[in-house]
Image (cartoon, coloured by chain):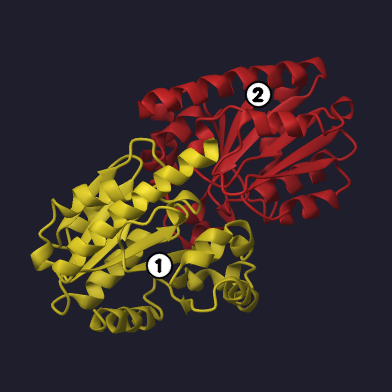
Chain colours: A yellow, B red
Amino acid sequence: MKIKVLKDILDANEQLAERNRQLLDSNSVFAVNLLSSPGAGKTSLILATIKSLKGEIKIGVIEGDVSSSLDAEVIGKEGVPVLQINTGGGCHLDANMAYTALNNLPLKSIELLLIENVGNLICPAEFALGEHKKVLISSIPEGDDKPFKYPLMFHKADAVLINKIDLLPYLKFDIQSFSQAIKAMNQAVEIFQISCATGQRIQEWISWLLIQLSKR
Amino acid sequence: MKIKVLKDILDANEQLAERNRQLLDSNSVFAVNLLSSPGAGKTSLILATIKSLKGEIKIGVIEGDVSSSLDAEVIGKEGVPVLQINTGGGCHLDANMAYTALNNLPLKSIELLLIENVGNLICPAEFALGEHKKVLISSIPEGDDKPFKYPLMFHKADAVLINKIDLLPYLKFDIQSFSQAIKAMNQAVEIFQISCATGQRIQEWISWLLIQLSKR
């Protein structure tokens, strides 16, 4: 019974996500759903991406948080349209929340929409928002065992960004075995090593993003 | 309607948690619910606690994960009774899962039960397991804004352990404002600064734990 209800919720979400996708496509907006643990670097990545693409690509942002509008305030200072969603206890964004946000953003003046999901490696993997790509940020201090503990998230990601590589000298993290574990459950995934704090190798992520955008 | 269903689930969970509490008390077991983001240091804290209290306090462990038994295997090597719960997609432990685990542990030979919840700062705050104390581990690399983003978790914690303080030289983290933010929403909370990796100030956590145990 419990499983039936959950399946209904997910089916309904898929339909709403498809509606969002059509709305995005009709406005030529390419949308990325950014997923990670709390504090892995979603907001830092958004800031680094805005900085790198300013004047080149028109960016919009949706900020998802249980509470507060701290991140939206920081991003708003960059002069891009940003909309905060507070889930008020909910542990993930869903397609209905995203739909409301889309209807309050100037989609005609956005080419790339970055959606920062709630910091959580579990439920956000199950709820599509209508995005074109799911990008997972996994940071060095979290440890290299995460693909085994949160397999669905790693399975569903189109790209995994290994963030905070500037901390590698101070922590145990085997990038090779981490990458192998991800590839074993998701052959098509792209993996990047970056540091949003230092800017190290951010350009590789940006290049990938621009290629995806060019395929719109 | 949605809210009604959720309230029913939480009410039912409270009742089951109370049953767990009675079972623990009748066996003189003191139980701690360990909560954190993925990779903040729950397993490392359990290992450091076992190491510190070996031969002094009889410890048992429940390991909660979406998937895998990696942590249970590591902890099993320490020679303490350990039981793995896999939620199979669920983003938190609940009292019913804990009840099953309690019935499969040798409670008569356990004085301190450490329950590692699923790595998630949201839903585990809402589901009591019958524990005597909730302990939240918040690590330096996650950033000092977490109390504002996950207020319920910080509100409900009996103690907050600021872990990975060995990384302070390499990261921006204002311990004073972080602690003030927590105290503002939770006056009774105890806050400790530790490093499970280096063992730094672990003894302060252990002393607090021993005081709680002595009050059983």
Q: Amino acid at mark 2?
A: Gly
| x, y percent for residue B95 | 63, 28
Closer-to-camera residue (A201/B5): B5
Percent x, y for residue B183?
Answer: 43, 29
Q: Quadrant of residue A168?
A: bottom right
Measuring 30% from the left and 56% from the top, which residue is drawn there?
A: A17
At 37% from the left and 78% from the top, the residue drawn is: A205
Q: Is residue B31 left or right of residue B173?
A: right
Q: Chain of mark 2?
A: B
- Residue B191 vs residue A100, the one in the foreground: A100
- From this view, report whether residue A149 is shown above or below residue B4: below
At 17% from the left edge and 75% from the top edge, which residue is drawn? A54
Residue under circle 2?
B130
- Whether residue B47 sits left or right of residue B17 in the image: it is right
> Helix or strand or loop: what does disc 2 sit on?
loop
Please indicate, yes or no, whether residue B28 appears anywhere in the rendered image.
yes
Badge 2 and badge 1 in a common chain: no
Q: CA distance from mark 2 to mark 1?
A: 37 Å
| Relative vertical location of residue A10 with respect to residue A61 in this rendering, above or below | above
Q: Chain of mark 1?
A: A
Look at the image and tell me in which quarter the N terminus of chain A lies: top right
Pointers 2 and 1 in contact (CB under 8 A)? no
Crowding at mark 1 (Cα within 10 Å: few <14, some 14-19, many 20+)? many
The percent position of residue A96, horizontal first and vertical second, equals: 27, 47
Disc 1 target residue: A135
The quarter of the picture where residue B54 lies is top right
Which label sits on residue B89?
none
Question: Disc 1 residue type?
Answer: Val
The residue lying toward the viewer, choosing from B25 and B191, is: B25
Q: Secondary structure at mark 1?
A: strand
Query: Quarter of the image holding residue A210?
Result: bottom left
